[in-house]
Image (cartoon, helix red, strand yellow):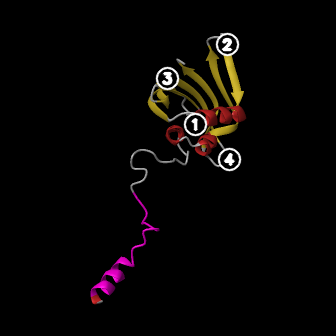
Amino acid sequence: LWKILFIFSFAGCINPFAPELDETIGSDGFSISDQSSVEGVFENLKYAYTFKDTSIYGNLLASDFIFTYFDYELNHNVSWGRDEEMRITDGLFSNTERLDLIWNRIVSISGDSTNIVRSFNLTVTFNPTDIENIDGRVNLILQKNSGNKWQITRWNDESNF
């Protein structure tokens, strides 16, 4: 009886339903930034794509956001606003198994960091036999919002897709 009480007294202090906080989360490079730096915008973009998180993605876009890409079939630029971008991105996140975004070097940056051109590689895995690799550049116009956080106001996609 003494042994059983002894074991339960020590085991009783451990609650398997309330484990201690894991301090290593985010140590693999996947942490959410507060967007107070330009690099934080890129970190959050990678996080949003990796974890298919439309909430994080939506926080990156200013209310007057415009996305533009060149449609090679129509031979002209196509643009849309924030609401359409969120709908399209939600569809991408919902219909893929995996998204791997790698940010490469910054090609150019304005002195005030409001215009950044950066190269990237994006691997879109729809299923194990349908994988698309997209290489290109983003040309972003950034501005600080009222909370002093960087947001994207304009995204010109310069990818090969």
Q: Secondary structure at mark 2?
A: strand
Q: Which residue is mark 3?
A: 134
Which comes before the other along the chain, label 4 or label 2?
2
Q: Upstream in the sequence, badge 3 or badge 1?
A: 1
Residue carrying label 4? 146
Residue placed most toward the observer, 112 or 134: 134
Give percent across and percent down for residue 74.
Answer: 67, 11
Q: CA distance from mark 4 to mark 1?
A: 29 Å
Residue 89, located in which quarter of the rendered image?
top right
Q: Earlier in the sequence, mark 4 or mark 1?
A: 1
Answer whether labels 3 and 1 touch (C-beta < 8 Å).
Answer: no
Q: Position of residue 97 (x, y in %)?
A: 50, 35
x and y percentages locating residue 98 in the rendered image: 49, 35
Q: Which numbered disc, 4 or 1, marks the residue closer to the eye?
A: 1
The amino acid type, in three-letter code, at marker 2 is: His
Residue at the limit of the structure toward the front, as seen here = 1
User: What residue sits right under mark 2 in the picture?
Assistant: 76
Residue at 43% from the left image edge and 63% from the top image edge: 21
Q: Which residues are magenta?
A: 3-23
Give the residue displayed 49% in from the left and 30% down from the top.
Answer: 127
